[in-house]
Image (cartoon, rainbow, N blue to C red):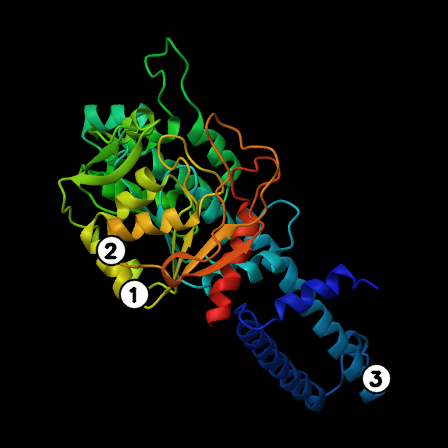
Amino acid sequence: MRKPYVFRSLRLWLRPGIHIKRWLLALILGITMISLGLAYLLRALYLAGPYPAFLYWMTLQFLPHAVRAALFGAAGVGLTVWAFIRLSRSLLEPFTEPGADVAVQLYRHRQRQRGPRIVCIGGGTGMPSVLRGLKAYTANITAIVTVADDGGSSGRLRREMGLLPPGDFRNNLAALSEAEEITQRLFQYRFPEGTGLQGHAFGNLYLAAMAGVTGSFEQGLLMSNRVLAVRGLVLPSTLELVQLIADVQDEEGRIKRIFGESLIPKVGRGRRIRRVYLEPDTPRAYPEAIKAILNADMIIAGPGSLYTSVIPNLLVPEITEAIAASRAVKVYVCNIATQPGETDGYDVNDHLATLESHANRKLFHYVLANHHIPRTPPVGEGSEWVPLPREPHGGYQLITTDLQDRARPWRHDPVKMGRALMDILHSRG
């Protein structure tokens, strides 16, 4: 039989770690001291002379002492608990969702605040899925984002204003926001043709405006983390305006060099990417990103475009060195489907070998991959499901599970991925 709502709510208020019992105890002690003071006053009045009639009836003098004590005690406890719950609801109402149980929300908030420190490294459209899945477990999330994007609205703002490309920051801020649905819709809104702002996403313009208000993109991003009530932080891997360069090889073995992140998947179709580089080749890492990596309990790379979203972060030397030095649990989340122009024909081992060749070392302990392969091919011309290897490359611990989003099977389901990643972390704990 399901417990009544009041008892379930009261049980949560009294759970350890919610930081309520200590203040409730202080409140009860205060009320008790006030009651003792009133009792001394009433006793003094009682001994001083004739007992006033109204006081006789107010204090229930016509009842035995034990009955009076029980009645006043029960009424006092009930009134205190009722007043405390109603007061807490009134105080917290502006900060809670309509119709939600305040005790449940406060308990979950405390649990997330004490959650593990997790760093996610990547960019593009894959990284927000990880963040959505993890933010239910912890508020201590740091998303470290690539700054090599040079296409679309981000590329225009980068060229015209000298800003770091805001697109990937926009997507990850929205994913970590408390009000994710409306923030996502607002940030993804693109102005139509004929407005003078055609092609620009509102979120990109917002970050550009914050950079202007605060004096720098860095400060604007940090301010946005607070303004948007983000559960965690979104940080750049470097503050330098880097360019991504790729060497691709055609079927005849000829090497072609491609300049610019946005061109690599287009020109790379029908060719195989041999290596990607950054220009300048040794950018300085953002200090807060290094600090987050070294203090992390878990470091996650991917999912996302292997060559244009994940690897550019690992080409920042200090980022790679910090990952190698960290004692965190390190996981690479492999893509579900191949990306035309980047990872045509790749299996899980190809992803791992590519990561190692660019980082010049083995960085990750675990590989999380999808094992549910549908019969129908993924959406997208030339895209295929990423097959699992018989044996994982280089001694990695391969963990496979169903990670697919049922509506879009070529993408990861945030809930499944969050649960799988937390299982990995707890298995090491």
Q: Report if residue 375 is visible in the image.
A: yes
Q: Give left or right: position of 282 versus 422.
A: left
Distance between the alpha carbons at the discs numbered 3 and 1 = 66 Å
Q: Give left or right: position of 71 versus 396.
A: right
Q: Give left or right: position of 332 versus 210.
A: right
Instruction: Report how many numbered discs are placed on residues in the image.
Output: 3
Question: What residue is drawn where x is 55% and y is 44%?
Answer: 413
Image disc number at residue 207 = none
Residue at disc 3, secondary structure = helix
Q: Earlier in the sequence, mark 3 or mark 1?
A: 3
Distance between the alpha carbons at the discs numbered 2 and 3 = 73 Å
Q: Position of residue 168 (x, y in %)?
A: 35, 37
Q: Earlier in the sequence, mark 2 or mark 3?
A: 3
Q: Residue furthest front?
A: 252
Q: Nearer the viewer, mark 3 or mark 1?
A: 1
- The amino acid pointed to by label 2 is Thr
Question: What residue is drawn where x is 37% and y is 47%?
Answer: 351
Say which residue label 1 marks: 326
Identify whether 84 is placed above or below 130: below
Say which residue label 3 marks: 67
Q: Residues within 10 Å of mark 3 (few under 14, many from 20)?
A: few
Q: Position of residue 390 (x, y in %)?
A: 49, 55
Residue at disc 1, secondary structure = loop
Say which residue label 2 marks: 320
Q: Earlier in the sequence, mark 2 or mark 1?
A: 2
- The amino acid pointed to by label 1 is Ser
Near-viewer residue (371 or 423): 371
Residue at disc 2, secondary structure = helix
Identify whether 293 is placed above or below 48: above
Quadrant (top left, top right, bottom left, bottom right) of the N terminus: bottom right
Q: Residues within 10 Å of mark 1 (few under 14, many from 20)?
A: some
Near-viewer residue (116 or 26): 116
